Amino acid sequence: MPQWKKDLIFVIVFFGENLGEDRFYIWENSSIHEIIFSNYQSLLQTHNGISPRNPNSRHCAYSEEDLSFKDPLKVALRGDRIEIGRDR
């Protein structure tokens, strides 16, 4: 499996039913990795350590619910720059 760049940024979009209802989440690769790992680990724990459909599968997914309860990155437009970071 290839090694992902740690400074990679994900922009995840959930399309709304109507114009203006789209939801955007901006995450660091390490946070997405943690969400996916946690979800996959939970799946395996509920099925005795084996993927239920295909034991050789490493497929995993996340939902909008997984993204919305965590601490996403904040985006700020500053003149001609975009700043991405966390509110601390």
Image (cartoon, grey):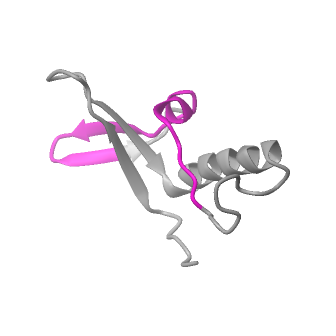
Residue 20 appears left or right of 76: left
Q: Which span of residues is magenta-colored?
A: 59-83
Residue 59 image point, x, y percent: 57, 59
Q: Residue at x 59, y 55 (%)?
A: 33
- Residue at the outermost bottom position: 2
Q: Is residue 60 above or below residue 87?
A: below
Q: Which residue is at 50% across, 37% downward?
A: 63
Q: Which quadrant: the C terminus? A: top right
Image quarter where the N terminus lies is: bottom right
Residue 51 is left or right of residue 49, and the answer is left
Which quadrant would residue 13 be assigned to in this image?
top left
Residue 72, given in percent of the width and then of the height, sits at: 48, 37
Q: Residue at x 71, y 56 (%)?
A: 51
Location of residue 82 with respect to 65 vertically, above or below: below
Magenta span contains residue 63: yes
Q: Nearer the viewer, residue 23 or 40?
A: 40
Q: Is 42 positioned to the left or the right of 71 in the image?
A: right
**Where does residue 16 sit, x and y in percent of width and height?**
26, 26
